[in-house]
Image (cartoon, rainbow, N blue to C red):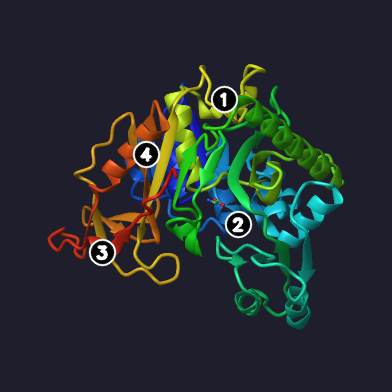
């Protein structure tokens, strides 16, 4: 009998995780994705399960009844609400940190205070629960300034404000009664996502994945509202000098280790951080040093799609990587920061979104992928899609991503744009009334 794996979530991240696990060298009996999308349905041995992943008892019952060997949690909400605690209490294997640790993502106030008390590099900040005091604080501050909602907000809880008026507006929008916001200084620089696999039981406890740059704003050149992410590229610092990259890596690993040691010590129990640790960083143009913008206790979306394409092309088995079954990885295994001989190539990810995303509700329409040829260098990961009458119906703002692998960065980018432009949108499920104004993508991914 092969393994049974359960993946929680319905986005491109979860599609790519199910895809890479379906290619594992281990014998895989079934991969369940809860609830999944039109893309997960098309992968080998992958089955979609209709179930609300925020109903933890229902997820647990499914895992117990189906003898699930491993559950991987895609999005943050179940982690912040303690699904890993429940699974562990029931002796089930789950990859994702417990509730205490997930506060690093679940509360901006918790995470900023944690960074501050552990001397981790981050922007100066202050927390507020009073709108007048928050607005008064702006009078002495330089613009732009960053306003952050304390809790989870699916990518909509952070505003970068260019003027005092915009910042006051943001305070009015983000500060709810009985809740808190953070106001923090803006750091100018280059954003970088450094994601680690942290498994306290593995022989190598922290494995750095390829560095990646996420394109968060909706429109070109960092304009428009913040989104979950509109694209990604590997090796964002490939044009830098090698020595600079190595010293940057040392600084980032120091941040990781300090974080893991401090959060483990702070837990007041024998529990250890177990799961993905996503360091959202700004490499400051002022001093070239990394500053923490945020922690996520999961992999990013669309970063995961990009990273897993890269791992697959480099023949890395994802289950080995997360230390499943105490699998052993060589001590020198490190994919994190540099384009090197052993792990080579570049990946580009471009998200196709529904016009109106992220602000407006998306009206019903369909897409046709038949003109886009997928092959070992081009892979589509679905997000907001379902199969309806044999056609692909759009069900969410981010519809899918096109992911490409190239020997050099520009060829990965060119192939991604060539491929995504072949996708067509229709108002009807018979695909008769073409209307490509229903979809959009950013034209500057990789720049
Ligand atoms: N792409 C950003 C995130 O997943 O948080």
Please tell me whether residue 274 is drawn above or below residue 368 in the rendered image.
above
Would you name the residue on which mark 2 appears? 77
Q: Counting residues from the N terminus, which is met first, the one under dot 1 or under dot 2?
A: 2
* Image coordinates for residue 206, horizontal then vertical, percent: 69, 31
Please tell me whether residue 409 is drawn above or below residue 88 in the rendered image.
above
Would you name the residue on which mark 4 appears? 413
Q: Are marks 4 and 1 in contact (CB under 8 Å)?
A: no
* Image coordinates for residue 203, horizontal then vertical, percent: 70, 22
- Tell me the quarter of the picture where residue 360 sits: bottom left
* Image coordinates for residue 442, horizontal then vertical, percent: 38, 54
Q: In this view, does 303 lie to the left or right of 243?
A: left
Q: Does the residue labelled 1 lie within 8 Å of ligand 1?
A: no
Secondary element type, mark 2: helix
Please tell me whether mark 4 or mark 1 is closer to you in this view. 4
Q: Residue 437 carries which label?
A: 3
Q: Are marks 2 and 3 in contact (CB under 8 Å)?
A: no
Instruction: Using a 10 Å C-alpha cutoff, classify the residue at mark 4 as few (fewer than 14 neighbours), some (14 to 19) or many (20 or more).
Output: many
Q: Counting residues from the N terminus, which is met first, the one under dot 2 or under dot 3?
A: 2
Q: Counting residues from the N terminus, which is met first, the one under dot 4 or under dot 2?
A: 2
Would you name the residue on which mark 1 appears? 320
Please tell me whether mark 3 or mark 4 is closer to you in this view. 4
User: Of residues 126 and 95, which is closer to you in this image?
Assistant: 126
Residue 85 in sight: no
Q: In this view, does 302 lie to the left or right of 440?
A: right
Marks 3/1: CA–CA distance: 43 Å
Marks 3/4: CA–CA distance: 23 Å
* Image coordinates for residue 446, horizontal then vertical, percent: 44, 43
Q: Split into 4 quadrants, where in the image is the C terminus?
A: top left
């Amino acid at each position: 009998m092969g393994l049974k794996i359960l993946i929680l979530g319905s986005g491109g991240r979860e599609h790519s995780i199910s895809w890479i696990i379906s290619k594992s060298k281990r014998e895989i009996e079934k991969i369940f994705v809860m609830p999944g999308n039109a893309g997960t349905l098309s992968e080998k041995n992958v089955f979609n399960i209709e179930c609300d992943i925020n109903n933890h008892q229902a997820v647990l019952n499914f895992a117990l009844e189906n003898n699930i060997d491993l559950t991987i949690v895609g999005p943050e909400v179940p982690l912040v609400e303690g699904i890993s605690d429940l699974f562990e209490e029931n002796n089930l294997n789950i990859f994702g940190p417990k509730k205490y640790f997930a506060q690093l993502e679940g509360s901006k106030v918790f995470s900023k205070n944690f960074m501050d008390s552990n001397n981790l590099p981050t922007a100066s900040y202050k927390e507020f629960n009073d709108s007048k005091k928050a607005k008064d604080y702006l009078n002495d501050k330089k613009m732009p300034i960053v306003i952050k909602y304390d809790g989870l907000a699916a990518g909509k809880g952070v505003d970068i404000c260019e003027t005092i008026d915009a910042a006051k507006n943001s305070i009015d929008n983000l500060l709810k009664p009985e809740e808190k916001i953070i106001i923090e200084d803006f750091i100018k620089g280059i954003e970088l996502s450094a994601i680690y696999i942290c498994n306290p039981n593995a022989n190598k406890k922290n494995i750095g994945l390829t560095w990646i740059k996420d394109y968060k704003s909706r429109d070109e050149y960092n304009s428009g509202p913040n989104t979950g992410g509109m694209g990604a590229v590997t090796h964002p610092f490939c044009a830098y000098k090698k020595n600079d990259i190595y010293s940057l890596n040392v600084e980032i690993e120091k941040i990781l280790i300090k974080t893991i040691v401090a959060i483990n010590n702070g837990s007041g129990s024998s529990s250890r951080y177990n799961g993905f640790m996503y360091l959202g960083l700004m490499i400051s143009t002022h001093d070239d040093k990394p500053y923490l913008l945020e922690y996520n206790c999961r992999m990013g979306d669309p970063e995961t799609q990009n990273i897993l394409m890269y791992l697959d092309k480099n023949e890395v088995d994802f289950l080995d990587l997360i230390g499943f079954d105490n699998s052993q990885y060589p001590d020198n295994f490190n994919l994190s920061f540099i384009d090197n001989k052993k792990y080579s190539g570049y990946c580009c990810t471009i998200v196709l979104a529904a016009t109106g995303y992220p602000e407006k509700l998306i009206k019903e329409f369909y897409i046709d992928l038949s003109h886009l040829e997928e092959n070992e260098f081009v892979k589509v990961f679905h997000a907001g899609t379902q199969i309806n009458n044999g056609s692909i119906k759009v069900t969410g703002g981010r519809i899918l991503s096109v992911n490409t692998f190239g020997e050099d960065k520009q060829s990965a980018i060119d192939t991604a744009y060539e491929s995504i432009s072949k996708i067509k949108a229709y108002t009807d499920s018979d695909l008769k009334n073409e209307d490509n104004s229903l979809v959009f993508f950013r034209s500057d991914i990789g720049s």
